[in-house]
């Protein structure tokens, strides 16, 4: 029986590891796809998925020969030559002269144009020769169809367009100016409140905690306008101008405090009671206990909330537009990247690049604090008094 039990535990451990690995892959795959797409050409993004960019792939392409102005006369025929690959890497496998059968001929064969108008040859290296009986007219060449096996191709043009766009640096600084205080202020306030709710005895403590838990389910969209009216009313009374960093700091503090207090209170309430009692016996005040004992022991919980709050504020656009505005000197990074897409989304090819640029800072914050994340969340969720 002991052997069977050990085998079950062993296979159970393998199953847990495989499950965790599968979850990690599922969560990481979209980010990797965004990363790959951010280096792809506009035309490639339009016709194929990011996974095709990692290996050589065949694509059916519609193109045009050189314009009629490049044609020359040879033995009574009008000839246009060129290369559909423009000297780049790749190989032509099939081509055609009709839209109904774009892969009718193998590369290197000579195909007759419809109606006996001439002959077309496209070689595997992309070079072609079009010979027509009548001279070509118009501003554009003849339409041709071919299948090309193209190797992976990447570019830095998307990053150059995003990083060198006007105002991107100022918007990055604006986002940092909003995010850092909007992360630190709730932590400072919530830490004091969490200690009071966990270790100080006063009337109404349970009611206050119940209200805080209830505030966790209040939708942001529901409280946004009332909070804005309240802020504007108080600002008019004290002569504080609207659309300032102070307003958005207070807004994010208000939205983040319920989760911060709840998370930190559960963690702090689970700290050993013997430490608190020993400190009180030695004559330490509540403030000294909080600063010298509780804060150092609560680093995992503080870091856990800091990650959540930083990610939320950095990626926010709605609160930033409402409380800060969208002028050139106030626009945050998410708003600037949205404007790069154009008023009608015409520059959608840089969407993946913009998304990856916007997550670089949150990723750095997450990986620098992730060792505290699970420890803080687990301790805050299973401990409490």
Image (spheres, helix red, strand yellow):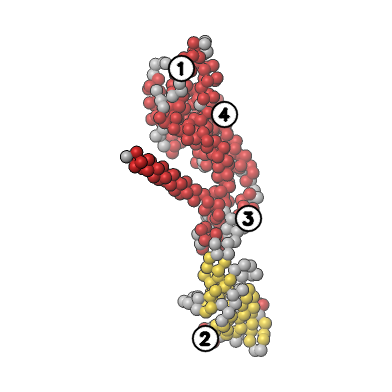
The spot of residue 298 in percent (x, y) is: 51, 26
Q: Are marks 3 and 4 in contact (CB under 8 Å)?
A: no
Tell me if residue 31 comes above or below residue 148 in the rendering.
Answer: above
Residue at point 56% right, 48% down? 356
Foreground disc of the pair 2, 1 = 1
Residue at point 48% right, 31% down? 376
How would you rate the neighbour count of disc 2 (Cα within 10 Å): few for under 14, some for 14-19, many for 20 or more?
A: few
Q: Are marks 3 and 1 in contact (CB under 8 Å)?
A: no
How would you rate the neighbour count of disc 4 (Cα within 10 Å): few for under 14, some for 14-19, many for 20 or more?
A: some
Foreground disc of the pair 2, 3 = 3
Foreground disc of the pair 4, 2 = 2
| Separation of residues labelled 3 and 4 (CA atoms) | 45 Å
Foreground disc of the pair 3, 1 = 1
Foreground disc of the pair 1, 4 = 1
| Separation of residues labelled 2 and 3 (CA atoms) | 45 Å
Location of the C terminus (image quadrant): top left
| Separation of residues labelled 2 and 1 (CA atoms) | 97 Å
The residue that disc 1 covers is 274
The residue that disc 3 covers is 156
Secondary structure of residue under mark 2: helix
| Separation of residues labelled 3 and 1 (CA atoms) | 59 Å
Among numbered discs 3 and 1, the one appearing first in the sequence: 3
| Separation of residues labelled 4 and 2 (CA atoms) | 79 Å
Residue at point 46% right, 36% down? 224
Secondary structure of residue under mark 3: loop
Residue 1: name its quadrant.
top left
Of the numbered discs in the image, which one, if any, rests on residue 240?
Answer: 4
């Amino acid at each position: 029986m002991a052997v069977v039990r050990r085998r079950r535990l062993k296979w159970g451990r393998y199953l847990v590891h495989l499950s965790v690995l599968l979850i990690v892959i599922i969560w990481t795959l979209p980010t990797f796809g965004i990363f790959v797409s951010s280096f792809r050409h506009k035309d490639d993004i339009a016709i194929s998925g990011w996974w095709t960019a990692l290996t050589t792939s065949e694509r059916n392409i519609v193109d045009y020969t050189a314009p009629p102005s490049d044609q020359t006369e040879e033995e009574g025929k009008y000839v246009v030559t060129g290369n559909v690959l423009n000297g780049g890497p790749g190989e032509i496998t099939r081509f055609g002269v009709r839209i109904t059968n774009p892969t009718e001929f193998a590369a290197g064969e000579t195909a007759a144009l419809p109606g006996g108008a001439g002959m077309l040859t496209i070689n595997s290296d992309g070079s072609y020769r079009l010979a027509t009986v009548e001279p070509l007219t118009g501003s554009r060449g003849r339409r041709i169809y071919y299948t090309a096996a193209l190797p992976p191709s990447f570019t830095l043009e998307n990053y150059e367009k995003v990083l060198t766009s006007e105002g991107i640096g100022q918007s990055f600084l604006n986002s940092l100016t909003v995010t850092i205080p909007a992360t630190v202020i709730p932590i400072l306030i919530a830490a004091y409140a969490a200690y009071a709710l966990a270790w100080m005895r006063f009337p109404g403590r349970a009611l206050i905690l119940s209200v805080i838990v209830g505030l966790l389910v209040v939708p942001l969209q529901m409280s946004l306008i009332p909070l804005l009216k309240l802020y504007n009313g108080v600002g008019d009374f004290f002569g504080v101008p609207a659309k300032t960093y102070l307003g958005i700091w207070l807004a994010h503090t208000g939205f983040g405090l319920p989760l911060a207090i709840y998370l930190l209170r559960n963690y702090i309430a689970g700290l050993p009671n013997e430490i608190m009692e020993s400190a009180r016996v030695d004559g330490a005040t509540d403030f000294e206990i909080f600063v010298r004992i509780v804060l150092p022991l609560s680093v995992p919980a503080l870091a856990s909330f800091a990650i959540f709050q930083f990610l939320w504020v950095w990626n926010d656009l709605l609160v930033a537009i409402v409380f800060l505005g969208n002028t050139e000197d106030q626009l945050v990074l998410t708003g600037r990247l949205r404007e790069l897409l154009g008023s009608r989304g015409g520059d959608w090819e840089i969407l993946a690049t913009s998304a990856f640029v916007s997550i670089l800072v949150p990723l750095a914050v997450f990986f620098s604090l992730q060792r505290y994340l699970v420890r803080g969340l687990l301790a805050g969720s299973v401990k409490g008094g």
